[in-house]
Image (cartoon, helix red, strand yellow):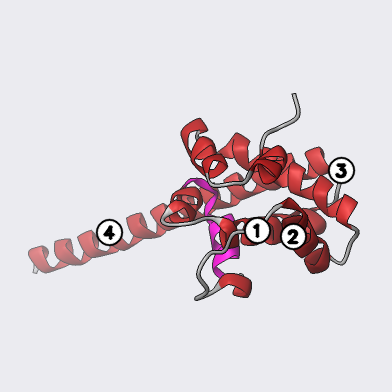
Amino acid sequence: MANETEGQQQQADGRASEELRAKRHESRTSRTYAFFLRDLQARAGVDRELAERAAESVLCTLEQRLMGGEVKHLEAQLPQKVRDMLQRCPRHEGLPPRKFKMLEFVQMVADDLDTTPNEAERLCRAVFVTVREHISEGEADDVMGQLPADLRALWIPDV
């Protein structure tokens, strides 16, 4: 009987430990997402809602442009909640990546955010700089290597 009680206690401890791990994971996930958004808000000078919409639009458009496994490599380094956001992006679901230049990229973001191309370009730059700060230099270089010269100008931060 003591063994049975001991076994039940171990199961309860195991469940509590799993719940604690899950809470810690959710807390860390929320914090990294909040840091990412705060960085983007400060850089772009926008509120949280527009920062979220801009991040989703720009990154979803970028994913339509990246070839091979590069999307998965990039996503692996982004905060979990950003990855979750991109999983919900229907614009490129099941479609092969395609090549397009900066003007088309910016226009796609402008259309998505219902804004001007100039504002969309400014938001693209802000999202890209924020993403670059949250991923490794090697991954940033890999993404840049797949972009045409005019689109690289948005990816590379102004010096």
Residue at screen point 58% across, 71% down: 92
Q: Residue 130 location, x and y as percent?
A: 67, 40
Evaluate if marks 1 and 4 touch, with contact meaning CB atoms under 8 Å apart: no
Residue 151, compared with residue 64, is above or below; it is: above
Disc 2 to disc 4, C-alpha distance: 53 Å
Give me the residue at 12% from left, 68% from top: 4
Of 119 and 67, the residue lying toward us: 67
All told, the count of numbered labels is 4
User: Residue tagged by mark 2?
Assistant: 104
Q: Amino acid at mark 2?
A: Glu
Asked whether the viewer can see residue 81, the reply is: no
Query: Which residue is label 4 attached to?
Result: 14
Q: Earlier in the sequence, mark 4 or mark 3?
A: 4
Position of 108 with respect to 26 (left or right) is right
Which numbered disc, 4 or 3, marks the residue closer to the eye? 3
Looking at the figure, which quarter contains the N terminus? bottom left
Q: Which residues are magenta?
A: 77-88
Mark 2 vs 4: CB contact within 8 A: no
Q: Position of residue 28 (x, y in %)?
A: 52, 47
Marks 1/3 in contact by CB < 8 Å: the verdict is no
Label 1 near label 2: C-beta < 8 Å?
Answer: yes
Residue at figure coordinates x 23%, y 64% from the top left:
11
Which corner quadrant of the image does residue 115 belong to? bottom right
Where disc 3 sits, the SS reads loop
- Residue 100: mark in rendering: 1
Give x and y (percent) for residue 124.
Answer: 75, 49
Local packing at callout 3 (Cα closer than 10 Å; few below 14, some 14-19, many 20+) is: some
Residue corresponding to mark 3: 45
Residue 34 or residue 15, whichever sits in front = 34
Name the residue located 44 percent from the left edge and 49 percent from the top edge.
73
